[in-house]
Image (cartoon, rainbow, N blue to C red):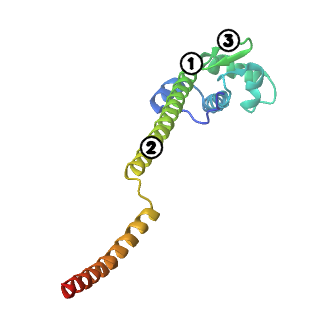
Amino acid sequence: MQEKSFFFGLYCADFLVDTNHLSNQAVGCYIKLLCRMFLERNCALQYKHAHKICGFASEGKNWKTLWSEELEPLFIPSKDKGFFTNKRLVQEKNKIDNIRQRRSEAGKLGAIAKRQYRVKRAKANASSLVKHNISNIDIEIDNNTKVIDKFSSINKDKDHIKANDVLNKQG
């Protein structure tokens, strides 16, 4: 699904060169038309709506003069009949769409790499536990066994001494 774009670069030098010959009224209409076209997915507008966007009530003499003498040379006919667009605006939209697509692909690749890293890390952690095969219960049993061995060795020594004494007395 293609997403709508809500911004485009307005290059000051290019804009001033393109609009130097226009009246202030034509410059305002030009900006309004560019902005409205950019909000459309295909960057095109129908000619019959242009006068409304520029604030003219109808396609009267004032609008037709403004369009034919000042604005029309700045636009090109679109693929669809009755529509017009702007070459530079289409280039800017394509540039933004390419950037958006590359970022999307990079994000997807990053998510895949992150998931693979997490799985690999989890397997590494799990395999280290298997190698050592030590749990809290095993550690506790080991500690208890050491304590029992310690006490039993003391008793063994006492028993050994008693046994030696008995043997020595009996001769």
Which residue type carries mark 3?
Lys
In this figure, which residue is indicated by the disc labeled 2? 123
Q: Is residue 21 left or right of residue 47?
A: left
Mark 3 to mark 2 CA distance (whole Å):
56 Å
Q: Are marks 1 and 3 in contact (CB under 8 Å)?
A: no
Give the mark, 3 or 2, whose residue is nearer the N terminus: 3
SS label for mark 1: helix
In this figure, which residue is indicated by the disc labeled 1? 87
Marker disc for residue 47: none
Give the mark, 1 or 2, whose residue is nearer the N terminus: 1
User: Which is in the foreground here, disc 1 or disc 3?
Assistant: 3
Residue furthest out toward the bottom: 169
Q: Is residue 162 left or right of residue 10?
A: left
Q: Is 141 rendered above or below residue 38?
A: below
Q: The N terminus lies in which quarter of the figure? A: top right
Marker disc for residue 79: 3
Q: Are marks 1 and 2 in contact (CB under 8 Å)?
A: no
User: Which is in the foreground here, disc 1 or disc 2?
Assistant: 2
Residue 65 in view: yes
